Structures are given as C-alpha cells and as structure tokens.
Amino acid sequence: MAEIEERRNVVYGDAGQRPLKLDVYRPAERNGAAVLVVHGGGWSQGSKDVLVNACRLLAAQGFVAMASEYRLTGEAPFPANLHDVRRAIRWAKENAGELGFDADKLCLEGHSAGAHLVLLAAGEPDDPRLVPPEGLGGVSGKIAAVTAIYPPTLFYFDGPRPSGAMLAESLPGADLSVETAALASPMTYLAAGYPPVMLLHGDADKVVPVSASLRFADKARAVGAKVDLHIYAGLPHGFANHPEIQPTLMSLIGGFFRRWAIGPEVFAATPMVLAQTAAAAAE
C-alpha cells in the first residue's frame, strides 16, 4: 500500500459543548480529490474508528480521506448530526490547500445513518434549521460526487408506510411532525443540480429496505440528476464492512469519484477513442 500519513483526532469544529474531531489519511501521491467518510450506527452509536480500513483503501488510490465524527442522538437530536457533517465539509474545504487537494473536488461517502447524512448534505438544503448556527463561513457546500451505502432516504410521520420509507421516530428530532420528517428526508432535496450520486444496497437488507435506494434512484432520474445504482443479491445491511467485499467495493467507489471529480471527460470518451489516443502517444 502507498505511503499514507495518518493524523487522528484533528479538531474540525465546535459543537458548543465539546470539540468535534476527524481523522485524516493523506497519501504521499495524491490525485487532487478528497473524500469525507461518515460512519453509520443508527444515528445513536458508531464511531469514526470503524472507517480506518475504508479510508486507507481510498488513500491508497490517491484520495485524501477523512473520517468524521458527529454528535449522536443521545447527545443532540437531529439536525445536530447534519450540522456537524456540514461543519466537517466546511473545514475540509477551508484546509484543502494544506491537505493537498482541490476544494472543488471534495466527495462524500456515507454508510447507513452516515449515508443519510451525506445525501442530505449533498443536497445543500438552505432551510435555516439545517445550517450550523454559526453558518458556513462563506464556504460553498457544493460536492463533486457522493456515494451512499444502504442509505435511509425517506421518513414518514404516521399512517401507512410509503415505499422505501422509515418511521421518523427512528431518528429523534425528525419525529416531531410531518414537516420535520420531510425536512430530514434526502428525497426532499433531489433536483437536476444534485451532484452525481452512487447508491449501493443489498436486497436482503432488513434494517433499511432496498426500496429506499430504488425509490431515490427513480426520483433522481426523473428530475435529471446523475445516478448509479448497484443492488447486491442476497447481501444484508452492513455488507460493506465484510473483509472479502470491502476492497472491491472501495475500488468501485474510488472509480466513481475519479469519474466525476477528476476526469469526467476521460470516462465520457469511447474506448476506441482512448485506444487510438494511447496508440498515437506510443508512436
């Protein structure tokens, strides 16, 4: 694996009661892009420490990888966790030069509850309730691309369960009203300008229904957003952490980020054109 500088517990923000921290994985040979990775755990548990291998695999591909903590719901209900993710985005962009990447090439990756938060952040919601109290300091929240692994994408408050939705009471803070359930739903913010998104989900998921990703992808296409959808037969929630699966999965994710953040024009070219260009260069 390539040489990687690891910096742990770097303070990226202040929640008012305590500092917020992230870990930085900085490869010696960088590709100009970065990935902020957000952990899962049902919003009530989990840690950035579970993201060590994922970040090392991204850094080995040339990305500056960052694993961020956020306040869990036992400490502060939604939208505090989203505030923290947006603070981490702001910090990453403000420090892009020192870390060695282009601030316009910042990507997001989230797992489960973290996938929900990165999908929300990628939509750049401008509702005052979803912006940190201190604001974003003039830093653009625009993201180059986002990957969401088994993400909750829609919440409902009461009544019959819509396809792909989770009951809002599973996310304290989103369970106050129909309005707050919609506020917490990434589906609410899908529009043509949404950044390129890749969704990964197992069809044996008993925690977040696979229909959550299917429905999100359908709406993304309907509004003109760019979306890739990967459904894995027989895989349950949490499959991305399986040691036999994770390396291949992170390679796929790295390729998606290179495609949209680094060289979209290269990926858009046909294989024949690329082959002819390579042949000409070799002459």
Image (cartoon, grey):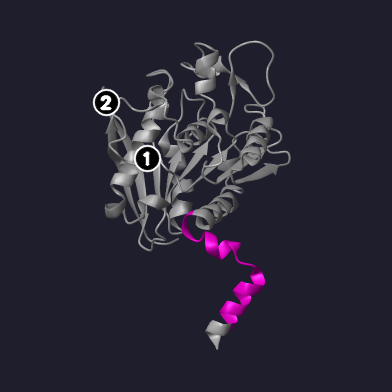
Quadrant housing the N terminus? bottom left
Q: Considering only vertical position in the picture, is 92 above or below 3?
A: above
Residue where numbered disc 1 is placed: 89
**In the orientation shown, which residue stands out farthest toward the right?**
233
Q: Secondary structure at mark 2?
A: loop
Tag 1: residue type? Ile
- Residue at x 47%, y 53% (from the top left corner): 58
Q: Position of residue 281 (x, y in %)?
A: 53, 83
Q: Is residue 247 left or right of residue 24?
A: right
Badge number at residue 199:
none
Residue where numbered disc 2 is placed: 18
Tell me if residue 69 can be seen.
no
The magenta segment: 261-279
Quadrant assignment, res 9? top left
Tag 2: residue type? Arg
Mark 2 Cα within 10 Å, few/some/many (few <14, many 20+)? few
Q: Is residue 17 left or right of residue 125?
A: left
